[in-house]
Image (cartoon, rainbow, N blue to C red):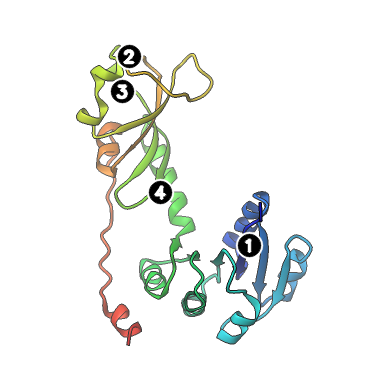
Amino acid sequence: MVNKQFAIIGISKFGLRMIEELSSLGCELLVVDKKKEVIELLKDKVSSAYVADVINEETIRKIVPETIDGVVIDLGDSFEVSILVTNYVKKMGIKTIMAKAETDEHGEILKIVGATHVIFPNREAAKRIAPIITSSQVFQFLPISDSLVIAEVEVIPKYYGKTLIEADFRKTCSLNIIAIKSIDSPDYSFFTPEYRLQPKDQLIVAGSFDAISKFSGVTFVQKKNTFTDMIRKLWSR
C-alpha cells in the first residue's frame, strides 16, 4: 500500500499538529515555510522541507507536485497569502485542500477560491468544550456540519427502565443511537432493541443541534452566515 503524500504550507500551531498526526498515520510529508529556523527543526522529521516565500505562484508549482494527495495551509494571520495559496493549489488540480481560517469572512473567501475544508482551530475547540461544561448530560460534543452533531450524552430520567424500542429516540427526540455504554461496561458497544435503559447509561447519538439541545438542556445558538456574495462575484471576474 502506497503511503499518502501531503504538503503542509506554513507552519504554526495547527500546522505542527497536522504534521504530528499525519506522520503518526504513516503519511509522507512535504513542508514549506519562509522561516529557516522552523524548517531546520522539521527537516529530519519529514520527507521534504523547503524554505520559501509562497506568495509567488511559480514557487508553489516548483515545490508542490500536482500528484500530491492533499495540501494543508496554515499561514498564521497572513490572510491574503493564505487566500492566494489556496487558489494556486486549486488551479493545480489538487483535490483536497485544508486551510486554516480566523474569521467567518476569511473562511468564506477560502471556500470561494478552492478550499475543500476550512478549519477554525480555536472555534472548533470551543464548540466541543462549551456544551460539555454547561450540561451534566453532555460528555463529548462533535459538530460534523451546520446541521449534524455527534454527542456523548447520559440517559435522562424519563427513559429509565424503558427498552430502546419503547424509548424510540428517533421519534421522540429526533436522535439516532450509535452505541451504548452501560454503568456495568467499561466501553461502548452495539445494542439490541430490547436493551433496557438504566440510570448512568451513556449514549453516542447523532442528531441536529436543536435535538441535542432539547435532550441535554443546553441552548445552542448558531450564527447564520451574513457574508455577502460580493467577494465571490469579484473573484470570479
Left or right, residue 96 beside residue 207: right
Residue 156 shows which numbered tag?
3
Observer-side mark, 3 or 1, equals: 1
Q: Nearer the viewer, residue 109 or 133?
A: 109
Reading the image, the residue beneath label 2 is 194
Residue where numbered disc 4 is placed: 127
Compared to residue 159, the image places residue 66 above or below, namely below
Kindly identify the residue that appears in the image at 52 percent across and 77 percent down.
92
Q: Which mark is residue 126?
A: none
- Residue 41 seen in this snapshot: yes
Residue at disc 2, secondary structure: loop
For this view, does 63 lie left or right of residue 118? right
Give the distance between the C-alpha atoms of the residues marked 4 and 3, in whole angstroms.
Answer: 22 Å
Q: Nearer the viewer, mark 1 or mark 4?
A: 1
Q: Quadrant of the C terminus?
A: bottom left
Q: Which residue is mark 1?
A: 5
Amino acid, disc 2: Glu
The residue at the far left in this view is 171
Q: Residue at x 66, y 54 (%)?
A: 20
Q: Residues within 10 Å of mark 1 (few under 14, many from 20)?
A: some
**Mark 1 → mark 2, Cα distance in angstroms:** 46 Å
Residue 113 versus residue 206 in the image, above or below: below
Q: Position of residue 127 (x, y in %)?
A: 40, 48
Q: Amino acid at mark 1?
A: Gln
Instruction: Give residue 78's position: percent from left, percent from top.
Output: 52, 76
Q: Position of residue 21 (x, y in %)?
A: 62, 52
> Which amino acid, by three-letter code, is at mark 3?
Ile
- Answer yes or no: do the residues labelled 4 and 3 have beta carbons within 8 Å? no
How far apart marks 3 and 1 lie (CA) works out to: 46 Å
Disc 3 crowd rating (10 Å Cα; few below 14, some 14-19, many 20+) is some
